[in-house]
Every structure is written in structure tokens, then in C-alpha cells.
Image (cartoon, rainbow, N blue to C red):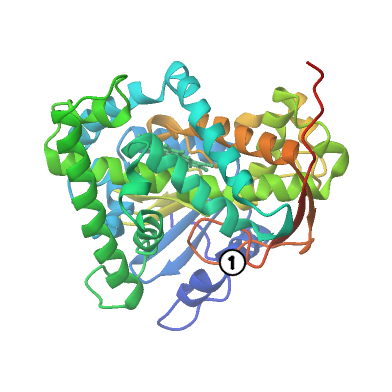
Amino acid sequence: MTLPPAVSGARPLLGHTWEFLRDPGELVRRGHAEHGRMFSVRLPGGPGVVLLGQDNAKFFHAESDALRLSIREAYRFLRHMFGGNTFWLAEHREYLRQRAVLVPQFTRGRIARQVEEMDRRTNALIDSLPDVGTVELTDLLGPLVIEIATSLFLGGDAASRFRGLLTEFRAFADGMDPLLPGWVPAPHLLRSHRARDRLRRITSTLVTERRAIPAEEPDFLEVMANTALRDDLLVDLVVMLVWVGHETTTGHLCWALIDLLRHPHELARVHDDAFLGRALRESERLHPVTAFLARVATVDIPHETCVIPRGATVMLHPGVSHRDAAVFGDPGEYRPDRFLTEPASALQTFGGGIHRCLGEHFAHSEMKVVITRLVERLEMRLLDPDPVAVRGHRSNWPRRPCRVAYAKRLPRFSPT
Ligand code: HEM
């Protein structure tokens, strides 16, 4: 038994590294056309194995839960952003201990209480806009999503007390670089480290204050401040949550709005909550913000007729898997109602197994609130009608510029 077949185009020495960096989607599409649902690529650290389709995703998550595929090894490159003992980067028992602290924070009841704050922030943003104008979508929605995350995880007044907090989180996120080691003095890494240090100081101050003066109604920060976790871990976990909570949600939210604006018949249905849920799933399918999910094999793993060798980086690529015509009819078309009959469980963007996203319901609630309010209060038109995703390894946001012209709707007359 051997390594899965290699996709064409490997260069001497570099293998597929350059193409993997520049346009990984194209590389995966070619591998799929050449070899089907399992193939290998040559990367700097050794072989990479790409797995596509629903069955392979189940295999990937089951092997991850059994620790034969390691999330810790795959996300080592995040060690310069967080302490080496934080969450995914910790040894498995410690990860489970930290996860157990987070899980109760994401119950539906708790999120229902947070929806009011999401709505308040969205309305305040719309209030602050001129009556008519043009906005760049990521510039408009990115700060809103970070503001909601800081408000809910760090406390309502954090952003107004600490100037530049939202920009600091973006600079911090720029440190997510799977190839350059964290010690390289590249400008984006240096910026990210400065932002990390400031974010840690601010979060630590907020935790100390909250312990001294509890809030009237205990919020996320207060519950976290009173757990048994060591302070440095606690601070890194809170920073991590604001980071994961905004990076992916911003991209998904922008795509969902773009898709709706491009399909006026569907846009008119967003007030139907169940429909809006399906529209979010359809944008998730067509434009998954998660470029890859990655693990490292800790042992040789036989799979079908091949062996995934120990040390190989194993990857799912939702972008290609979501266009499988055997699962989704007319996979290139935007049809939210497909999920009345087709399986949302085949989507891979929120992960699976024990690592399935804890914030999925949070993200869906937030996106629903923001989209509903925007559509209710603004007449909108896409000025860049055919946006494409950014290339590379960051979350697949729509590429800039992605401008929207808007006019505020007149408030409805309500007889008293
Ligand atoms: C559109 C929005 C989002 C997407 C697409 C997304 C995607 C993902 C994915 C793919 C994973 C698993 C990573 C892996 O297995 O390698 C994950 C895990 C996680 N996400 Fe999300 N996420 C989103 C929003 C959020 C939000 C808003 C939060 C929190 C506020 C959040 C918190 C988490 C946490 C805590 C985990 C770790 C679960 C574990 O490993 O135990 N996510 N997310």
C-alpha cells in the first residue's frame, strides 16, 4: 500500500508549495479532476493528503477524535499567537478541560440573551450612516462583527474604553500564517505580536476588574473570570474566542448578503427565519470561508487502497467538496431551498466530531440579526456584482472592493 496518487505540476525541490500558497483552490480542483477524492501534494514539511467528499470528511473527523489525526500538530503555527498550552495547542486532556469551560457558554438560552446586544449594535451602525451612500462591505461589516464579539466576550464598554481595540484584533489576526515561523521579523508578524501583547494586557485588566466588581447580571467575562483556569490561559482563551468569533463570521456574513442582493426574489424572503437559515447554508456551501481544515497524522493510517503516512498533513477542502453534483443538484447555482431536500449535513465549513464549531449557533444568530436589520432599514444594490474570494489561506472573504450603494428606507408610519 502506498501514498495517495500525487497531483501533477510538482516542481523540483519546491513540489506544490508555490501553487499551494498562491491558489490552493485551483490545485485541489486539479487534483480532484486527476485522481478523485483522495490525492497527495508535496509541501515543504512533507506530504500533504487532500480528502474530498462526505465519507472522507467522516473519516477525517473520526480519526481526529481517535487522536490518530492531530489538530494540535496541524495548528502549531498558531503558537506565536497564543501560549503553547491554549486550547488546540494544549495536550489533549488539557484541551478537554478548557473546552468543558467553554461549552456551557454556547447554549441556545445564553445566545438568545445575546441577540439583543447584536441587534442594538447593528441598529447603532445603521443610525451612524449618512442617509445615502456607498460602503465597502468588509469595511462595514468587519468592524461590526468585531464590535459584537468584543462587547459580548470582553464586556459592553471594552471597545469604547480602549481606543483602537477593534484595529488591534485585525492586526492580531494577520499573524495567522501557516508557513512563516512566528520568530521571522516579517512586518505582519511583528504587528500581530504587538497587538497580541496589548490585547493580553487589556483582557487581563478587564478580568481583574470584573472579579473586583461583579456585573449586575453575570456575563461571559464574569463567568470566565471565576473559573478554575490559570489567568494566562483564561486571557488567551478569551482573546482566541474574539478572534475565531469574528474572522470567519465576517466573511460568511458578507457572502450571505452578496448572494441575497444578487437574487432579489430570495432577498424579499429574509424575514422568514427558516428561509434565512437556508440562505446562510447556501452561501456557506458556495463560498465556504474555511479554506482548509487540517490535521497531522500521528501514525501510519491505512485508508482505502492507500496509506496516509505518519507526519503527513491531512486536509479537507470544503470549497471543492461542496460542489459535488452527486450530493447537490446543479451545484453551481444559488438555491437556498435546496436544503428542504438536500443534506446540510454534507457541508464541512463548521467542522465535525469533537472539534465541530462551538460558535455555530452564535454565528447564525448574529448573521440573521445583522442581515434582517440591514435589509429592513436599507435599500441596497451591489456595485461590484461578481465578487470572488480572496486567494490563499486566510478565511475566504470576498475580495475587495465589494461595494454596496444604499439609501435608508423611510421609517414606517405607525398610527397611534
Ligand atoms: C461563520 C462563522 C464560523 C465558521 C465558519 C467557523 C468554523 C469553525 C471550524 C471549521 C472549526 C473547527 C476547526 C477544525 O476542526 O480544524 C471551528 C471551531 C471552533 N469555533 Fe467556529 N466558526 C465560526 C464562528 C465561530 C464563532 C462566532 C465562535 C465563537 C464565538 C466560534 C468558536 C469556535 C470554537 C470555540 C471552536 C473550537 C471547537 C473545538 O475544537 O472544540 N466559531 N469553527
Q: Residue furthest bottom?
A: 12
Residue 199 locus on image (x, y percent): 26, 53
Instruction: Kindly state the secondary structure of the residue where label 1 is placed.
Output: helix
Q: Dot 1 corresponds to which residue?
A: 27
Q: Residue furthest right?
A: 265
Relative to 404, is 284 above or below? above
User: In what quadrant does ligand 1 lie?
Assistant: top left
Q: Is residue 292 left or right of residue 234?
A: right
Q: How many marks?
A: 1
Q: Is residue 58 left or right of residue 378?
A: left
Report if residue 365 is visible in the image: yes
Q: Residue at x 14, y 44 (%)?
A: 232
Q: Is mark 1 within 8 Å of ligand 1?
A: no
Residue 110 locus on image (x, y percent): 42, 20
Report if residue 397 is visible in the image: no
Residue 122 is drawn in which quadrant? Answer: top right
Q: Image quadrant for the C terminus? A: top right
Residue 345 locus on image (x, y percent): 60, 30
From the viewer's side, name the closer residue of 149 and 82. Answer: 149
Local crowd size for mark 1, using a 10 Å CA cut-off: few (<14), some (14–19), many (≥20): some
Q: Residue at x 38, y 58 (%)?
A: 173
Relative to 150, is 196 above or below? below
Q: Residue furthest front?
A: 416
From the viewer's side, name the closer residue of 313 and 273. Answer: 273
Q: Is residue 226 left or right of residue 130?
A: left
Residue 328 is drawn in which quadrant? Answer: top right
Residue 88 locus on image (x, y percent): 28, 43
Looking at the picture, which amino acid does disc 1 mark? Leu
From the viewer's side, name the closer residue of 301 and 402. Answer: 402
Relative to 120, is 325 above or below? below
